[in-house]
Structure formats: structure tokens, C-alpha cells
Image: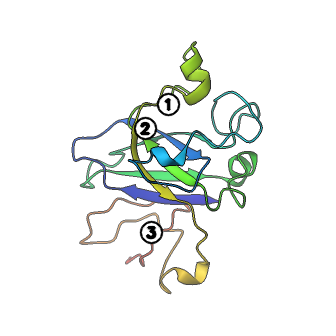
Amino acid sequence: MVNGVIKGFPADDKGLHGFHIHALADISASCTGAGGHWNEDAKDHGAPGITNSHSGDLGNIRAGQFASYAPPVANVRYDENVAASTKILSTAIGKAMVIHAGEDDLGLGGDAGSLATGNAGGRLACCIITAVDNSALPANARCDSTTSNPGESRPKCAEGLCCASPTRE
């Protein structure tokens, strides 16, 4: 299971954003140092879980999924089957993760740009993928919370999403 929460979207952002693993561990020059999409098998751009797509194709994330949470956040969650098909579990460590400014058309746009990048536009944000040992999580972390914590402005967690804080019943 690969999951998390992405914060820092502009307050009025409620849109879809292409979400990809890029080939290089370089987040310089407004994320352009990350190079192109991770595509070790030289396939067309596509969607997660599709065998004939880039290794780094992770589809879209939606900013502002939870109206009560400000600033907007996006949940990221890939189950074991999708993570295995995109090789994300081990071989993506050290590569860059990029959030694009626009929606990824998942290779269905009918043009060369779609088959190369999903026409997802410029790069909004990026980071280097690193492994985190479970022992690095707070001792009281609950990864099965389905209720929000009273007094906090974060949303309920999706089943299995680790919120890194205890749930108060």
C-alpha cells in the first residue's frame, strides 16, 4: 500500500492534477530538472494499472477533495496491485515525484502530447521519493482511522490512510 496526503495547494484549487514519477532525482529549476516521466520500458503514456504505460504513470490527484479542510489537500492511495504494476514499491526510491499544473488525460487525448505526457501541463510541485521506515512514524500513529479528530481541521481519513495522529473517539 502506498498512501499519503499532499498539502499546499492554493486555497481555491479544486482541480485534477497529473501525478507522475519522473526519471531523475533532481528537483531544480522549478522541477524541470526531474526530466521526463519515468518510462524504463519505452511505452506510451497511460494510467495506473495499465500494462502498456509508463512505469511512473499515476493518473490524477484532486486538490480540495474535502471542503472542510483549508488549505486544500489531496489524498494519494495506491493498492498493492497498482503499486506493483507501476514498480513503485522499490525501484522508484530516489526518483522525483511531480504534481503537474493540469489534468492528465491518461493518454486518451488523441495527439502526440497525450501519448508522451498526458498533456498535464507545467510542473506545480515536486519532491524526491525516499523510503520511510515505519519506526519513523509517531508511536501513536493510526493508519486505520475513519473518524476526524475533534478540534482539528483535517478530514476523515480514507480507510487505510495513515493520519500520523491518534484518533480520539
Residue under the point 54% across and 17% down: 109
Tag 3 residue: 163
Mark 3 vs mark 2, CA separation in Å: 22 Å
In the rendering, which numbered label is found on residue 104?
A: 1
> Which numbered disc flags the more N-terminal residue, 1 or 3?
1
Count the marks: how many? 3
Residue under the point 49% across and 48% down: 33
Residue under the point 61% across and 61% down: 94
| Spot occupied by residue 58 in the image (x, y as percentages of width and height) | 59, 42
> Which numbered disc flags the more N-terminal residue, 1 or 2?
2
- The amino acid pointed to by label 1 is Asp
Q: Is residue 168 left or right of residue 132?
A: left
Look at the numbered disc 3 and give the secondary structure of its residue.
Answer: loop
Tag 2 residue: 17
Q: Residues within 10 Å of mark 1 (few under 14, many from 20)?
A: many
Look at the numbered disc 1 and give the secondary structure of its residue.
Answer: loop
